[in-house]
Amino acid sequence: LSGHKIHAPKGVGALFLRKDVRLTAQQLGGHHERDRRAGTENVPGIVALGRAAELARQHLAAQEEVARLRDRLEQELQARFSGVTINGTAAARLPNLSNLSFAGVDAESLLIALDLQGIAVSTGAACSSGSTEPSHVLTAMNFPKQRIRSSLRISLSRFTTETDIERVLAVFPKLIERQRAQTR
């Protein structure tokens, strides 16, 4: 579990292991956590993760609203543009994530254009931000390279509002049309 996914600080997380799973230490030097790791524990980060988990549990019902906002964003984008595909609809999805392909659009260029408008998106998994490699998840799903190169990941949270969705929907049209016009 990566803590920042539930609004804890970056750099703190948790690992759940079955009792029969054996780990080999990746760092040597200390005997923390039954010789599983070396180094001093990030106590403030651990406390913050615990509190974020408590708050996430308290606000679990809010995930239905997050899913509704995600679905609205996806449906509106598909209604406004041809060639918009929702990646991963065949499987159960997290309510706060949307991964969309925009035919005829270079996702990296669209990402930069959206960033200039104050809208943060990603072209891959959060764990590989800054990477220019295609999404390993979409690659594993056997999507064609062009579909992967035209895909964006949009993250929402319980703090996402209708106003946020309206803003994204207001900005997308000119950016998509500009991108598609450049590739014609």
Image (cartoon, rainbow, N blue to C red):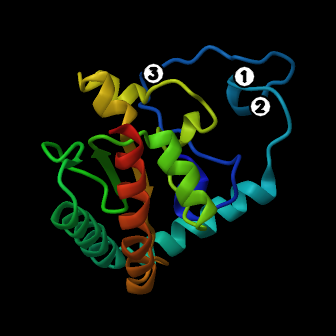
- Camera-nearest residue between 150 and 11: 150
Label 2 or label 3, whichever comes before in sequence order: 3
Across and down, in percent, residue 159 comes to 49, 78
Q: Are marks 2 and 1 in contact (CB under 8 Å)?
A: yes
Residue closest to the far left? 90
Q: Which residue is labeled 1 in the image?
A: 35
- The residue at the point 52 percent across, 75 percent down is 55
In the visual, does 73 lie left or right of 18?
left
In the rendered image, the vertical position of residue 134 relative to residue 176, given as above or below: above
Where residue 96 appears, x then y in whole percent?
A: 37, 62
Name the one closer to the observer, 166 or 138: 166
State the SS at label 3: loop
User: Looking at the picture, does residue 117 appear above or below residue 43?
Assistant: below
Q: Please tell me whether mark 2 sits on a helix, a strand or a loop.
A: helix
Marks 3 and 1, the one that precedes in the sequence:
3
Q: Is mark 1 on a helix, strand or loop?
A: helix
Q: Which amino acid does label 3 sit on?
A: Val
**Residue topped by disc 3:** 21
Q: What residue type is labelled 1?
A: Asp
Left or right for 19, reference 102: right
Q: Name the residue under label 2.
A: 32
State how far apart marks 2 and 3 are (Cα): 17 Å
At label 2, the amino acid type is His
Q: Residues within 10 Å of mark 1 (few under 14, many from 20)?
A: some
Residue depicted at 61% across the width and 46% down the height: 13
Indicate the quadrant where residue 69 lies. Answer: bottom left
Residue beneath the point at 24% across and 43% down: 87
| Disc assigned to residue 96 | none
Between residue 94 and residue 16, name the one nearer to us: 94
Quadrant position of residue 105: top left
Q: Could you tell me if the residues under marks 3 and 1 are in contact, i.e. CB atoms within 8 Å? A: no
